């Protein structure tokens, strides 16, 4: 069963999506930049690191920290 056949699933999906947007909006500018580069621009960690002035492994750590932060904020969903 998918959200097109179950109105409750569709509402829950929209609520989760809205919660993710709110959590994303609460990120600091640098954190949003990292996430946008990775998920919207398909930038590599090397490219992200270059933009931030850090190494690719450090960019990976920063990404992991942001993902953890978002998961904490979305824990109730």
Image (cartoon, helix red, strand yellow):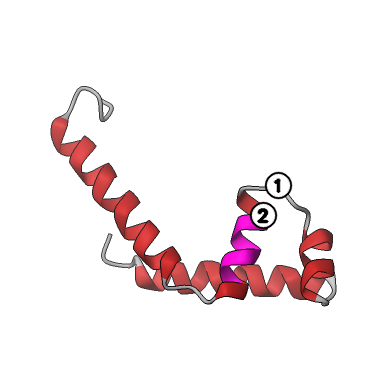
Q: Is residue 47 magenta?
A: no
Residue 41, percent from left and from top: 68, 48
Q: What element does badge 1 sit on? A: loop
Q: Residue 52 appears in which quarter of the rendering?
A: bottom right
Farthest residue toward the left?
A: 8
Residue 22, percent from left and from top: 35, 64
**Range covered by the magenta-colored residues:** 31-37
Q: Which mark is residue 14?
A: none
Quadrant (top left, top right, bottom left, bottom right) of the C terminus = bottom left
How many circles with numbers are drawn on the protein?
Answer: 2
Q: Main secondary structure of the magenta part?
A: helix
Name the side, left or right, on which 30 lies relative to 21.
Answer: right
Q: Which residue is drawn at 33% across and 67% down?
A: 75
Q: In this view, does 16 lie above or below 69?
A: above
Name the side, left or right, on which 66 lies relative to 60.
Answer: left
Residue 70, percent from left and from top: 45, 68
Nearer to the camera, 76 or 16: 16
Q: Residue 38 carries which label?
A: 2
Q: In this view, does 52 lie above or below 14?
A: below
Q: Which mark is residue 42?
A: 1
Label 1 with label 2: CB-CB less than 8 Å: yes
Counting other residues with Cα less than 10 Å from the Cα at mark 1, is it few (<14), some (14-19), or many (20 or more)? few
Q: Which residue is drawn at 78% across and 54% down?
A: 44
Farthest residue toward the top?
A: 5
Q: Does the magenta stretch include residue 35?
A: yes
């Amino acid at each position: 069963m998918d959200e097109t056949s179950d109105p409750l699933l569709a509402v829950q999906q929209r609520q989760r999506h809205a919660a993710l947007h709110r959590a994303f909006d609460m990120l600091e500018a640098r954190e949003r930049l990292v996430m946008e580069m990775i998920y919207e621009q398909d930038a590599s960690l090397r490219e992200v690191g270059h933009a931030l002035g850090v190494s690719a492994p450090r960019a990976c750590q920063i990404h992991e920290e942001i993902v953890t932060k978002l998961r904490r904020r979305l824990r109730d969903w």
